[in-house]
Image (cartoon, rainbow, N blue to C red):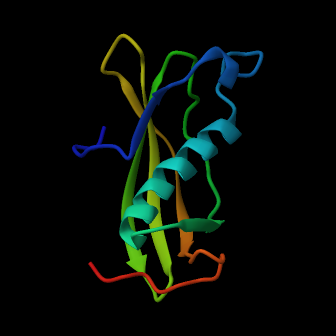
Amino acid sequence: MPKRDPAIRVTAMPADANAYGDIFGGWLLSLMDHGAGLVAARRAKGRAVTIAMDGMEFHQPVKVGDEVSVYCTIESVGRSSIVIATEAWRRERHSEHGGKVTEAKFTFVAIDETGRPRPVEGE
């Protein structure tokens, strides 16, 4: 597990799983988007929306009861866009054993109250 705080951490529940007990990929993608969205909104100092994400490859399944942590790193900031490298990690419920599940880059655009792109403010 990375040695920094996650953007978001949740427990995978039965409603998030398929008939085999594996967590749906869409649920995991949504969780990653939520985590990256929190980071983007803080950096943009306001509303930021997802406009793209690169492909994902799943390295291992997430099971019901696993703790899922999403870690985010801002890779670049443009005039109105923010690219965030996002990783999802799992940890078995009753142990320290786990590993990286998947990763992707999410691109957000800061928008104003009318939904139009706006500049990302400086640090």
In the rendered view, does 11 fall on the left or right side of 94? right
**Quarter of the image where one finds residue 5:** top left
Q: Nearer the viewer, residue 3 or 34?
A: 34
Q: Position of residue 65 (x, y in %)?
A: 51, 15
Q: Position of residue 90 (x, y in %)?
A: 44, 30
Q: Residue furthest left?
A: 3
Q: 53 above or below 27?
A: below
In the rendered view, does 66 fall on the left or right side of 22? left
**Quarter of the image where one finds residue 44:** bottom left
Q: Quadrant of the N terminus?
A: top left
Q: Position of residue 74 (x, y in %)?
A: 37, 67
In the rendered view, does 64 fall on the left or right side of 67? right
Whether residue 107 appears in this view of the structure is yes
Q: Quadrant of the C terminus?
A: bottom left
Q: Residue furthest top?
A: 94
Q: 47 above or below 22?
A: below
The structure residue drawn at horizontal position 59% and vertical position 66%, both measured from the top left corner, is: 49
Q: Position of residue 4 (x, y in %)?
A: 24, 46
Q: 64 above or below 41?
A: above
Q: Nearer the viewer, residue 116 or 23?
A: 116
In the rendered view, does 18 fall on the left or right side of 87? right
The structure residue drawn at horizontal position 48% and vertical position 21%, both measured from the top left corner, is: 66
